[in-house]
Image (cartoon, coloured by chain):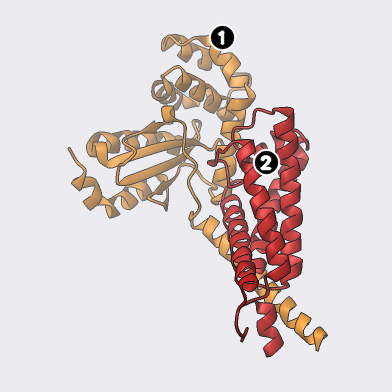
Amino acid sequence: MTDRKNARLAALAGIIIFVSTIAVLLARQFNLGPERPAPDFRTFGPKTAPVQIYEYTDFACPACRHAAAKVDEMIKIFGPGLRVSFKHYPLLRIHPWSFHAAAYADCAGEQGKFREYAALLFETQEKWGQAKEKPKEFETYAARLKLDWPKMQACSEAPETHKRLKLDMAEADLKGVNATPTFFVNGKRAVGAGQLVDQARKFDNLLRAAKP
Amino acid sequence: MNGKLEPKDILGLIARLAVGGVFIYAGLLKALAPAEEFGYAIESYKVFNAQLSLWAAYTAPWLELYAGLLLAAGVFTRLSAAFSGVMLLFFEAMLGQAWLRGLPITSCGCFGSGYGNSLAHEFTQNLVFLALAWAAFKYGSAYSADKAVETL
């Protein structure tokens, strides 16, 4: 009798464990978990915006450059209806300097110039993206934007900076991001600028309602 | 099915649901976030190295989730309650040593990275959950799967 009872309970435990595991894995894939906030310097738009976009991007990826221009355009058009949070997903295997670029961009952000530095990195990605040695462009752009270079260098090597980048990458992996740029528009996945615009259109009524 | 419930049975049921619920919530929050995030939180206790912390971060959320679900449903209630109690004791030891050493921990990692109570607060809260886990162990059989299976 006890054996039978234990067998039934073990079966029930197995079912509970199996179902909960599948549910959590699906929830991860469908992006149902809480979104980690991006630092303020790489978040644009009001907190209360009805359309929230999380963008996973790589500074050396041409499609990301194209998408960045699209995102800038959307921010201009929809203003307060949109909040864009920028997250790093450097593709380390094909872009050897992307991680460094992301770290420098964050450090520029700490000095108040993330957007400007990021724009320069995107514009000139062919120059530094596949460089054999550490690209000089990182320093050149810092000088052009009148940023404190020694401070940026120290910041780019700081464990805190690396930790922030690695968490962005880990989060992207968890969500099954495997291409850049990947967007989550109010939780819905979009890969590339084309899908981003398609997704954003689905929230057109929200965006227009919030238009100034 | 369970006849008339006595106050201790009600206490046991509430304790089982409370501890089970907290474990489910804590496990889910962490299982849905990158393991590295919880790994960094574990590392900040300065007990395990980075690699071990990451392994702990990969496994602990799932153990919490399973223990919480089994306890709340009352499957192997005593075993689930004992296992939850052992986990709570372990968390308590981690929190206690960090508190005594005055480690600068801003997020205990208990409910994901966004949760930032003081170590003293978490330590005290865990004591309450430990007491509840004991109540669930002792009196948690009401409306449990264990009981339901007995009557089948």
Q: Amino acid at mark 2?
A: Gly
- What residue would you read off at disc 1? A150
In the rendered image, the residue lying farthest to the front is B7
Residues at discs 1 and 2 both on one chain: no
**SS class of the residue under badge 1?**
helix
Give the letter of the chain under mark 1: A
- What residue would you read off at disc 2? B39
Q: Amino acid at mark 1?
A: Pro
Picture disc at residue A188: none
* Left or right of residue B58: residue B18: left
Rendered shade, chain A: orange
Where is residue A48 shown, x and y percent of the image? Answer: 31, 41
Above-or-below relation of A96 to A173: above
Give the letter of the chain under mark 2: B
Q: Nearer the viewer, residue B117 or B131?
A: B131
Q: Which chain is red?
A: B
Q: Nearer the viewer, residue B130 or A180?
A: B130
Q: Nearer the viewer, residue A98 or A1?
A: A1
Tell me the mark number nearer the camera, choosing from 1 and 2. Answer: 2
Residue A210: which quarter of the image?
A: top left
Q: Is residue A76 visible?
A: yes
Cα distance between the residues tagged 1 and 2: 30 Å
Where is residue A103 shown, x and y percent of the image? Answer: 55, 25
Q: Is residue A19 visible?
A: no
- Mark 2 crowd level (few <14, some 14–19, many ≥20, 10 Å Cα): many
Above-or-below relation of B112 to A94: below
Where is residue A189 shown, x and y percent of the image? Answer: 43, 52
* Left or right of residue A66: residue B133: right
